[in-house]
Amino acid sequence: MKFSVVIPAHNEEGVIASTLGNVLEKLNAGSFDFEIVVVADHCTDGTVRILADFAGRDGRVRWVENKGKPGFGMAVRAGLDEYSGDAVAIYMADASDSPDDLCKYFRKIGEGAECVFGSRFIKGSHVSDYPKHKYFLNRFVNYLIRFIFRHGLNDTTNAFKCYRREVIDGCRPFLSPHFNLTVELPLKSFIRGYKFEVIPISWENRKAGISKLKLKEMGSRYFFIILYCLLEKCMVAKDYHK
């Protein structure tokens, strides 16, 4: 199988080089057939220069521009229109995700999993320097989603997940332009009948740059996509099942 990694990046010149270097090192060691697609999301710093340098040195790294409106979801969607692999993982540019976990995702997909979802809050996971206010809000939102959808996943909002190509294609069209895409993708895959496996993962708070997630701006967007997916589940889910 060929595996793809989609990395949305907005003004990440302080970390993108180390992120790409670590991912390349681990995937090379794992002997995977892979590509890395970095989406430059309306960058105004030196991110694009760094991406061009990496792409020039390694043909498995390429970068594209988010030509739509700026936003995490729009950048990821641009990457999902560009990747060429049999499966794709969404990976954060800020080095908060572990490349070791990325390798675990790909191995699970190679063993036959349709989706692999990491959880930062189960036995075996490791979280470093998670902001307290975000932690309590995260736990509340994820508990609410788990209660509504009864899917057994306690970290739906985490962006770092992996999907086979047929899952991505089967979950289109995508609606979310921002971080609410992190909820839309897993909920749609669950509602539309795809099976997922959950593994413990590690998470570490960024060491450079600024977080792009603005909690005050995201509340209504998360609520919208949760309501949309709930309506699909209750009214037309059977139309999508395989």
Image (cartoon, rainbow, N blue to C red):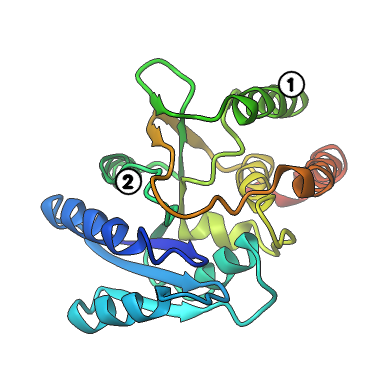
Q: Secondary structure at mark 2?
A: helix
- Asked if one can make out residue 90 in the rendered structure from this viewpoint, the answer is no
| Residue drawn at (41%, 73%) of the image | 47
Crowd class of label 1 (few under 14; some 14 to 19; many from 20; radius 10 Å): few
| Residue drawn at (48%, 71%) of the image | 39
From the top left corner, tell me how far across and down residue 9 is, in percent. Answer: 48, 65
Crowd class of label 2 (few under 14; some 14 to 19; many from 20; radius 10 Å): many
Instruction: Choose between 216 and 177: the one closer to the eye.
Output: 216
Point out the tag, 2 or 1, that comes first from the N-terminus.
Answer: 2
Query: Up-down: is 184 above or below 136?
Result: below
Instruction: Choose between 203 and 61: the one closer to the eye.
Output: 203
Residue 77 - label: none
Q: Quadrant of residue 118?
A: top left
Q: Is residue 148 left or right of residue 104?
A: right
Q: Which residue is the site of mark 1? A: 147
Q: Which residue is the site of mark 2? A: 102
Q: Is residue 234 left or right of residue 133?
A: right
